[in-house]
Every structure is written in C-alpha cells, then in structure tokens.
Amino acid sequence: MIALLTGLIAYKSPDHVILDVHGVGYRVMIPFSTYYELPEEGTATLHIHTSVREDAILLYGFRTRTEKSFFQLLISVSGIGPKLARDILSNIQPPQLAAALLQGDLHKLSAIPGVGKKTAERLVLELKDKAGKLDTGSLSAAETVGRSLPESTVLDDVSSALLNLGYKDVQVRKVLAELDCAGRASVEEVLKQALKILMK
C-alpha cells in the first residue's frame, strides 16, 4: 500500500496532480486545500490514502497528516465515499470541520454540496467525539501561491472546479458575478473567495 509519495510535479489541476516518481507518473486526487499549497513546479511530498475498488485503485493525496486523518475519519462514516470526503475537505478546512462536528453545526455541514441534512446528522453522530481527539493545530494555513493567468482562464478553471464539487450551474454563475478578481489572478485566490461566498 502506498502511504507517501515524493516526486516532481508533472501536472497540477484543482482536483488532481500527477507526480513523477523516478519516471513513473502517479495520478493523485487532491482537495483544494492541498492544491493551494502545492508549488506550480518542482518537488512535492504527499501523504497518500490508497482506495482499492473492484474496478480501480485510486490515490488520494494530502499535504499534511491532519488532512489525511480527517479524510480517513470521513470515509469511516456509512455513505461517505472517498470522492465525497475529498469534496468535503475542499469546502471546509479540518479545524473548521472539527469545530462544526463538535458544535453539531448542521447548517454549516449541510451547506457543503453532497452533504444533506441526514448526512450532516450522521457525521455529527459518528464523528463528534473522534474529531475532538485529532490534532488540528499542526495544520498550516493554505498558502496562496500560484501562477498568474488571464482572468477569463481563471474564471473558467474556478467554474469547472465548483461544478465538479457539486454546485449547481446557477449557483456558480451567480458567485462568479460577485467575485472581485482585480489584481488577483491566481486560481487559488479566486477559488477561496468563491467558496467563502458559497458557504455563507
């Protein structure tokens, strides 16, 4: 089982990265929080969770052990698969997720695409005690590094990423109209701004 990968970034997108490890390219699914912190090029190390299905072996990567721990905690809940767990972590950072679980904040949890009221209730019921035991203090704040891109390209990438996360087309169009991209052309910054608006 693969638990850790270090390699050169051959390709990076909001939902996955390809790491070149001694000539072998590993496709690793990532949450936005990891995407924010990865450099555009060079070497990166990811903590890996290996998901084995009948039809595929999928790798999920995280910049910190804390993120990986929360991911594994989420997929331990009935009805929460790896993709939804990754999408949850793309919408909410582990410290805020832990707080929402401990406080039983169903409104914040159910606002995440793919997490309805029943799923939010199940998350609180099953993870409230466990979440409080995980160390969220070691999680570094997401860095906003990124290449400058034309505004239209950035908005296209942000739109695609939000749709992949489960937001409706009408929601995406509305939030894109509210975004202030002036002087800030990285995908990471605009994504963070969009998610803050959508999670209000």
Image (tube, helix red, strand yellow):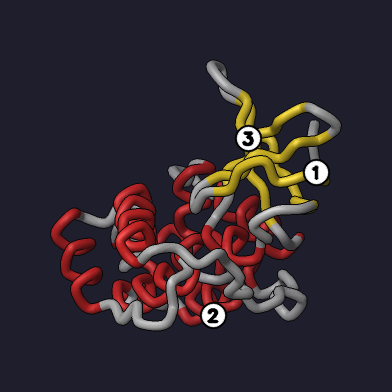
What is the distance, in whole Å, between disc 2 and disc 1 at their CAs? 34 Å
Upstream in sequence: badge 2 or badge 1: 1
Q: Secondary structure at mark 3?
A: strand
Tell me if I can see residue 118 in this picture: no
The image position of residue 149, as x and y in percent, is 44, 63
**150 is higher (above) or lower (below) than 135:** above
Residue 55 vs residue 174, the one in the foreground: 174
Crowd tier of the residue under label 2, counting other residues whose Cα lies within 10 Å: few below 14, some 14–19, many 20 or above:
some
Count the labels in the image: 3
Which residue position is annotated with label 1?
A: 7
Tell me if I can see residue 151 in this picture: yes
Q: Amino acid at mark 3?
A: Arg
Q: Secondary structure at mark 1?
A: strand
Q: Amino acid at mark 1?
A: Gly
Q: Is residue 168 left or right of residue 184?
A: left
Upstream in sequence: badge 1 or badge 3: 1
Q: Quadrant of residue 28?
A: top right
Q: Do the residues bearing badges 1 and 3 touch, measured as CB atoms within 8 Å?
A: no
Which residue position is annotated with label 3?
A: 27
The image position of residue 108, as x and y in percent, is 37, 75
Q: Is residue 163 left or right of residue 42?
A: left
Upstream in sequence: badge 3 or badge 2: 3
**Which mark lies nearer to you, 2 or 1?**
1
Q: Which mark is residue 99?
A: 2
Q: Amino acid at mark 2?
A: Ala
Residue visible at 67% across and 48% down?
Answer: 61
Residue 15 vs residue 149, the one in the foreground: 149
What is the distance, in whole Å, between disc 3 and disc 2 at their CAs? 32 Å
**153 is higher (above) or lower (below) than 192:** above
Crowd tier of the residue under label 1, counting other residues whose Cα lies within 10 Å: few below 14, some 14–19, many 20 or above:
some
Residue visible at 14% across and 59% down?
Answer: 170
The image position of residue 1, as x and y in percent, is 80, 31
